[in-house]
Image (tube, rainbow, N blue to C red):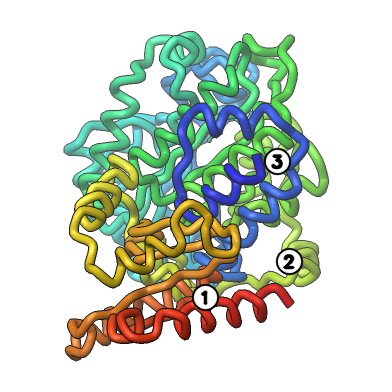
Amino acid sequence: MQKLIDKAKVEHTLSKSEIVEILKDNSLNDYLFKTADEIRKNYTGDEVYLRALIEFSNICRCDCKYCGIRRDNKNVSRYRLKKDEILKLADFAVQSGYKTIVLQSGEDMFFTAEYLAEIIKEIKQNDVAVTLSIGERTFDEYKILKEAGADRFLLRIETTDENLYKKMHPGMSFENRKRCLYDLKSLGFETGTGSLVGLPEQTVESLADDILFYKELNADMVGIGPLIVHPETPLKDEKNGDLILAIKVLALTRLLLPDINIPATTAMETLHPQGRIWALQAGANVIMPNVTFEKCRKNYEIYPDKVSVDYSKLERDLKQIGRTISKKHGFRGNSDSPLTRHFVPPSPAGRGKNNNIAKTLRKNVTPQELKFWNIVRNNKFQNLKFKRQYPIGKYIVDFVVIEKMLVIELDGGGHNTNNQQKYDEERTQYLTSRGFKILRFWNDEIDKNIEGVFEKISNVLQKKGE
Ligand code: 5AD
């Protein structure tokens, strides 16, 4: 199973059955978390992005079975903030240094797209990103919100098990939920989705589907949280979700979507005081502190005992794990990490596209590549497993020994042009920052001094082993 995790670390793909295998087996959890943490560091750096959350209305037309502010819960005191109250909170958040304001609410149709657009435009006078989390709307409404300046949108798919989705969301449609997400993507929102872990009858197979769905959508953000049973909902007699399983789903999401933003969710800390920190050490890079008025906050009880972020404690905790609070907006791909800048998200078809190129290249081998290949194939050289024309990120390398993180490139004459040199440099930087050592040989060396070539390879491997 370690091999599967290593593969995901390099290729950022896993099949459904591979994900299921990892989710079911708890013997390598620490290795999974450590690997996801490494990928997080490589792709998004050590900075943690804070997003200021404003819960501006707890009025909701939906009746989700797990949610404390569902329409049918009559024991909630409902509130709806006024425009200037929302702006006041946003202003407070801006003054406090937040670079993202998240406007979250139940599905409250009092807030038309036009009205929300006014609020968004005001907030966008400041140098901040605006994220919306207001549920399902039409394409045209989303378009108005985008044109008003909203940057991001959060809409969890909650579960990709269609039957379970129907049971949990009376009167709602799974198809429409997906339609919303694809509309948001097509409108250019940084789109966030995610799931609840621990819904009744939810299987690990469906959690694997959830992760593959994030990948298929090419989600820019993914929020995962364990279910926390609310006593005023139809799920009151169910069990809470499993925190470790939720963190595993998070870690796997990081492995498959290395450059995205992933929050350490409040639900995780609510289940365990260390929950948020564990998540931050297993792939998460975002925290969403609540800045809503105290008197409202207690009525926005989607689940009981929701904890708040204690800012100075957070600073201390982050410092202890070598992380800092970012002063940047934290868009996907904008971290200082060199990897992020070079990462091209895979096409929805996964790495299939690259693989086809790889196959084509395999057919057009140069004589030098063939000569090299004939020496190393079938573990013939030092019993190492060489692979040829192997896709790593957006690049395809000539040869690689994954277990040694060694890439070997054979260059013909074509690498001398300026453009090619720049491309090669980028490629080298990309591969180096992912932990690969790159050795380049000229075709000439292969032709005339193949012994020397393998001597160099031996030396490098020896040094790596020391
Ligand atoms: N426990 C945990 N998370 C919940 N959410 C709603 N109710 C609960 C609950 N009881 C989550 C949903 C929603 C997000 C805003 O809160 O996933 O998308």
Question: Three-letter amino acid code at disc 2?
Answer: Leu
Q: Nearer the viewer, residue 351 or 299?
A: 351
Q: Are marks 2 and 1 in contact (CB under 8 Å)?
A: no
296 versus 291 height, above or below: above
Question: Three-letter amino acid code at disc 3?
Answer: Met
Judged by depth in the image, the label closer to the viewer, 3 or 1, is: 1
Q: Is residue 241 left or right of residue 180?
A: right
Residue at 23 percent across and 32 percent down: it is 138
Q: Which quarter is ligand 1 in? A: top right
How many angstroms separate mark 2 from mark 3 (CA)? Answer: 16 Å
Q: Does residue 264 appear in the picture of this structure?
A: yes
Q: Nearer the viewer, residue 201 or 21?
A: 21
Which numbered marker is on residue 268? 3
Position of residue 61 measured from the top left corner of the image (x, y, whole percent): 42, 21
Position of residue 68 measured from the top left corner of the image (x, y, whole percent): 61, 23
Give the residue number, with chain letter if any, for mark 1: 437
Give the residue number, with chain letter if any, for mark 2: 318
Lower sequence index among marks 2 and 3? 3
Q: Does residue 96 appear in the picture of this structure?
A: no
Position of residue 240 measured from the top left corner of the image (x, y, whole percent): 73, 23
